[in-house]
Image (tube, rainbow, N blue to C red):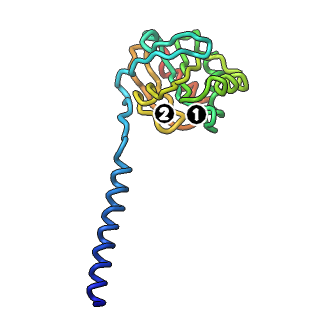
Amino acid sequence: MKKRRLVIRTIILVILGAAVAYSLYANLTKDQKQKVAVGDTAPDFVLVDLQGNKHRLYDYRGQGVFLNFWGTWCPPCKKEMPYINSQYHQFKDQGIQVLTVDIQESELAVKQFRDRYKLDFPIMIDQDKEVMTAYGIDPLPATFLIDKNGKVVKYHTGEMTEYMVREFMEKIKP
């Protein structure tokens, strides 16, 4: 009787262990997004900024594009936004365009953030995460450097210093 219980318990334990292992494997491998890789042509998109201006990525061919994905709730985003704004002023007349894409937040929250940090580059909101999905963004902040031919020359995740932002903009100057 004891031997039979031991065998049944062992079988149950093996089945549970296999189920846990399968669940972990399935969760780690599901939704692995295909990131846009260095050398790829950046996927085109059209988004409207907070002033109502339409921005299409392909319209910026011939210029370097500093494409930053962010959120108002993101501490590293809060730190790097003033650096991006400062360098935007340094490079905007040198063929560099800064486009920033907030992910799925309210227009009010994004406008308050813009005003608090005195940002004046184009800020767009990706309400349905289509652009985020197309670029395979995870986690935020994420920045793509796109050259004058529309090719991705660098992908960076995480907080940037002002020095890094400057270096990145130099890298995509036409």
Q: Is residue 124 left or right of residue 119?
A: left
Q: Is residue 24 above or below residue 155?
A: below
Q: Residue drawn 54% across and 19% down?
A: 99
Q: Nearer the viewer, residue 4 or 116?
A: 4
Q: Is residue 24 left or right of residue 172?
A: left
Q: Residue drawn 35% across and 56% down?
A: 23
Q: Quadrant of residue 2?
A: bottom left
Disc 2 marks which amino acid?
His
- CA gap, disc 1 to disc 2? 9 Å
Dot 2 crowding, Cα within 10 Å, few <14, some 14–19, many 20+: some
Q: Residue drawn 38% across and 33% down?
A: 35
Q: Are marks 1 and 2 in contact (CB under 8 Å)?
A: yes
Q: Is residue 118 left or right of residue 70?
A: right
Q: Disc 2 marks which residue?
A: 156
Q: Disc 1 marks which residue?
A: 160
The picture places residue 47, in percent across and down from the top left corner, at 50, 17
